[in-house]
Image (cartoon, helix red, strand yellow):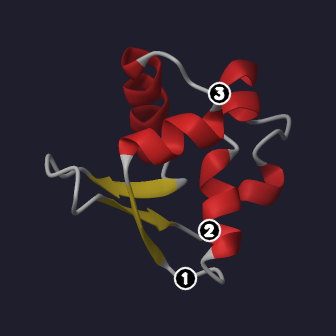
């Protein structure tokens, strides 16, 4: 799905596409593992988000569009699970 994220039928706002490049980067660094353990801080830094609200809106939107499956955790040491969907 990431290769056509900017396609003509895309429902993702341009600022989300530009700013949320952190997930594909982390996915690539993991060797394209199906599930990633990530922290909010790690994703916000990679995506250049400054607002937690924007982060949550974006990750919820990607989850609702089935680009990812997101299981949040409230333990900053454990990290949330993101699964990149085909």
Determine crowd level at label 1: few under 14, some 14-19, many 20+ residues with C-alpha closer than 10 A: few
Q: Where is 81 relative to 59, above or below?
A: below
Q: Position of residue 83 (x, y in %)?
A: 44, 67
Circle 1 sits in a helix, a strand or a loop, which is it?
A: loop
| Quadrant of the rendering where the C terminus is positioned | bottom right
Q: Position of residue 19 (x, y in %)?
A: 69, 30
Q: Where is 28 relative to 55, above or below?
A: below
Residue carrying label 3: 16
- 6 displayed left or right of 54: right
Quick check: marks 2 and 3 in contact, CB under 8 Å? no
User: Looking at the image, which residue sits at the far front?
Assistant: 77
Q: Quadrant of residue 38?
A: bottom left
- 58 displayed left or right of 11: left
Residue at horizontal 24 percent and vertical 50 percent from the top: 72
Quick check: marks 2 and 1 in contact, CB under 8 Å? yes
Residue carrying label 2: 27
Residue at horizontal 71 percent and vertical 20 percent from the top: 15
Q: In this orientation, which residue lies closer to the viewer: 47 or 1? A: 47
- 17 displayed left or right of 30: right
- The label shown at residue 33 is 1
């Amino acid at each position: 799905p990431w290769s056509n994220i900017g396609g003509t039928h895309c429902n993702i706002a341009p600022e989300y596409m530009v700013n949320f490049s952190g997930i594909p980067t982390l996915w690539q660094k993991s060797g394209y593992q199906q599930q990633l353990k990530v922290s909010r801080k790690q994703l916000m830094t990679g995506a250049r988000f400054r607002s937690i609200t924007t982060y949550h809106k974006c990750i919820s939107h990607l989850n609702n569009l089935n680009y990812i499956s997101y299981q949040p955790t409230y333990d900053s040491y454990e990290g949330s699970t993101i699964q990149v969907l085909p």
